[in-house]
């Protein structure tokens, strides 16, 4: 029996943790035509949740995520990830694992009971980038007991992993595989990854090694052993001078999820014809770029956000093969979302933070 109401967390506006409202009287959504209703088993926390809440995506913000959090709120009208106004209230939660409990018109009843991992990307019929959206951003997501998603986004998953472990995959590992795909990383290449102990960075380490690449990881001394255990061959401190440590023109690909002051050094260690792929800027979104470095070294700069269905299918295949290692730091009850996000921002340990309704 599907209840009429559910527990959920509503994001009421841009601002601090006080904008997260835990309620137990939110109406359970009904699946529309072509949709399914998923009973959420677990949903992971991502940088996007924080960035959206504090309005960090606004072009009026030029600081690191932590600095923006300290200022609490940005009320600009371009606070959505795509530069548009964000619609409140919203149930966030991009990473969703659960079971289908109801289906809308046009969806087979046989799908009820399927355990699914949700592809978070909402793609238009023509597969263009113009009107792409995300679960938890353009529509309500997994920080609730139930969520509706397009049936095509609810992907059957057969795995011995727990819901908590599976929920750690979609956004972080999907982003990581997309970065490596866009940068065309192949066997024998050297990949330098920043933020290697975070959700995306640790996924990049694993996925790049699966491609046969040599991985050099930038992380803290305290987390170095964790990152080495995931497959990195070498770690560097965040404060390291990359040119001194590695030499100029020594790296084939840089995968950057940090941004900030290290940007110039990252381009300096790229060899001629190298590729720089970026999908995050928690250390600061505004960086200096000497165009001579870009064109005289024939570098490619790749902004990577929207994943393709093929990337998500590849991710599911690797999960079902047991090839990937989930890296979960902690699981919190949904009611403790403020504590979970505070833990996430502290980044004291390696791995993902997951919420359980």
Image (cartoon, helix red, strand yellow):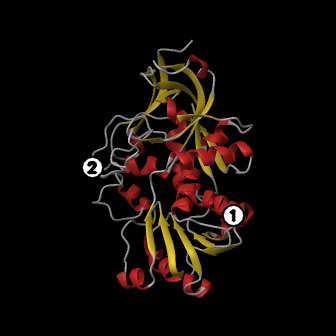
Q: Identify which residue is drawn at 67% across, 59% down.
A: 206
Is disc 2 placed on a helix, strand or loop? loop
In this view, the residue in front, 225 or 263, is 263
Query: Residue 105: image x %, image y %?
Result: 45, 18
Residue at 31% x, 50% y is 79
Element on which disc 1 rests = helix
Who comes first in sequence, dot 1 or dot 2?
Answer: 2
Quadrant of the snapshot with the C terminus: top right
For disc 2, the marked residue is: 75
Name the spot of residue 260 as percent of width and height, x first: 43, 70
Tell me where residue 101 sits by quadrant. top right
Foreground residue, 276 or 240?
Answer: 276
Q: Give coordinates of residue 154: x percent, y percent.
A: 55, 33
Q: Which residue is mark 1?
A: 209
In this view, 60 is above or below 243? above
Q: Quadrant of residue 125?
A: top left
Q: Residue at x 64, y 41 (%)?
A: 166
Where residue 7 sits: x, y (%)?
50, 25
Q: Residue at x 67, y 51 (%)?
A: 327
Can you see residue 209? yes
Which of the numbered marks, if any, corresponds to residue 55? none
Number of the front mark, 1 or 2 = 1
């Amino acid at each position: 029996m599907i209840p009429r109401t559910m527990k959920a967390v509503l994001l009421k506006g841009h601002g601090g943790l006080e904008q997260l409202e835990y309620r137990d009287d939110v109406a359970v959504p009904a699946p529309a035509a072509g949709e399914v209703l998923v009973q959420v088993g677990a949903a992971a926390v991502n940088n996007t949740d924080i960035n959206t809440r504090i309005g960090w995506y606004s072009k009026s913000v030029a600081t690191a995520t932590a600095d923006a959090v300290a200022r609490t709120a940005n009320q600009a009208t371009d606070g959505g990830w795509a530069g548009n106004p964000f619609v409140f209230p919203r149930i966030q939660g991009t990473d969703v694992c659960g079971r289908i409990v109801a289906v809308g018109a046009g969806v087979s009843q046989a799908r009820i009971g399927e355990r699914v991992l949700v592809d978070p990307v909402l793609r238009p019929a023509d597969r263009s980038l113009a009107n792409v959206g995300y679960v938890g951003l353009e529509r309500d997501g997994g920080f609730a007991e139930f969520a509706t998603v397009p049936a095509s986004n609810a992907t059957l998953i057969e795995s011995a992993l727990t819901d908590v472990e599976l929920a750690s995959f979609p956004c972080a590992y999907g982003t990581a595989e997309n970065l490596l795909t866009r940068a065309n990383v192949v066997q024998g290449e050297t990949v330098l990854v920043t933020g290697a102990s975070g959700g995306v960075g640790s996924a990049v380490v694993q996925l790049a090694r699966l491609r046969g690449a040599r991985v050099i990881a930038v992380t803290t001394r305290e987390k170095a052993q964790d990152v080495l255990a995931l497959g990195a061959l070498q770690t560097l401190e965040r404060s390291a001078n990359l040119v001194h440590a590695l030499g100029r023109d020594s790296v084939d690909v840089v995968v950057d999820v940090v941004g900030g002051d290290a940007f110039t050094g990252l381009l300096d260690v790229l060899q001629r014809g190298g590729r720089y792929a970026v999908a995050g800027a928690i250390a600061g979104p505004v960086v200096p770029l000497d165009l001579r470095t870009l064109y005289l070294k024939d570098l490619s700069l790749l902004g990577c956000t929207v994943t393709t269905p093929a990337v998500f299918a590849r991710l599911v295949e690797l999960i079902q093969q047991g090839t990937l290692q989930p890296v979960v730091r902690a699981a919190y009850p949904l009611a403790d979302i403020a504590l979970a996000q505070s833990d996430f921002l502290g980044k004291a340990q390696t791995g993902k933070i997951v919420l359980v309704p």
